[in-house]
Image (tube, rainbow, N blue to C red):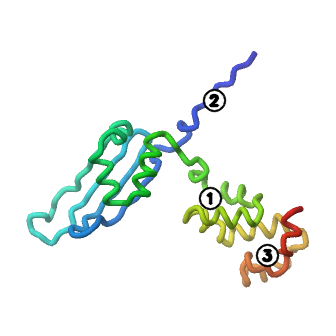
Amino acid sequence: MVTVLRPKMASLLEGQLFQISGQGPPPPKDFFQLVITKNEVILRSWKISLRLECRGAAPKELKTSHHDFLHQKMPQQQVGAIFGQRILEYTISLCQGKFDYLERLPDDMLLKILSYLQLKDITQLAQTSHRFRKLCNSEKFWEQIVRNRCPEFTSDMDGIANAMGWRRIYFTFFHTSGKKEQQ
């Protein structure tokens, strides 16, 4: 009997799981960066001020383990106040080991997977995140759809598709009210 050892899915993740940066809430409007790695939550801040005593101030950095972040209210409150409740909830999920592996796939691989979905599923997926909306509306995605699903598309039509747009070509010439969708 052969035993196959498989790595845990989390070991396939890169070192940095998530990063966001931006200006904090007024009045100070300092600049913040949140980085979540496999092991730590890092919150960096830069003081933005015209005051002389603030010039040349070094950035601050708060590092905490996932475990400590989950059990300490102060870092959670800071992340929530700076980046909002949604980012706080996502940070907590990552610290709990709840990773969205689909979201972490490279664009080319996602486009390949998306090309197998039905149009109604593509429409729904495009509403789930900014990244999926961008991918589902991209010319590269619609070119893949036309080339894979439209056998009557010829290489002579490339110029027209590039000029008109691949999505428009699909809906103008190849999409017929769901008949092909069910095949």
**Callout 3 amino acid:** Tyr
Foreground of the two, 98 or 30: 98
Of labels 3 and 1, the one closer to you? 3
Taking the spot 68% from the left edge, 60% from the top edge, the residue there is 111
Looking at the image, do the residues carrying marks 2 and 1 touch, with CB atoms under 8 Å apart?
Answer: no
Q: Residues within 10 Å of mark 1 (few under 14, many from 20)?
A: some
Mark identifier at residue 166: none
Taking the spot 79% from the left edge, 75% from the top edge, the residue there is 170
**Callout 2 amino acid:** Arg
Mark identifier at residue 107: 1
Q: Quadrant of the C terminus?
A: bottom right
Tag 1 secondary structure:
helix
Q: Quadrant of the N terminus?
A: top right
Q: Label 3 belongs to which residue?
A: 170
Q: Outermost residue toward the top?
A: 1
| Horizontal and vertical percent position of residue 51 | 11, 70
CA gap, disc 2 and disc 1: 25 Å
Tag 2 secondary structure:
loop
Q: Is residue 73 above or below residue 175?
A: above
Q: Label 2 belongs to which residue?
A: 6
| Horizontal and vertical percent position of residue 32 | 31, 60
Taking the spot 30% from the left edge, 48% from the top edge, the residue there is 75
**Callout 1 amino acid:** Asp
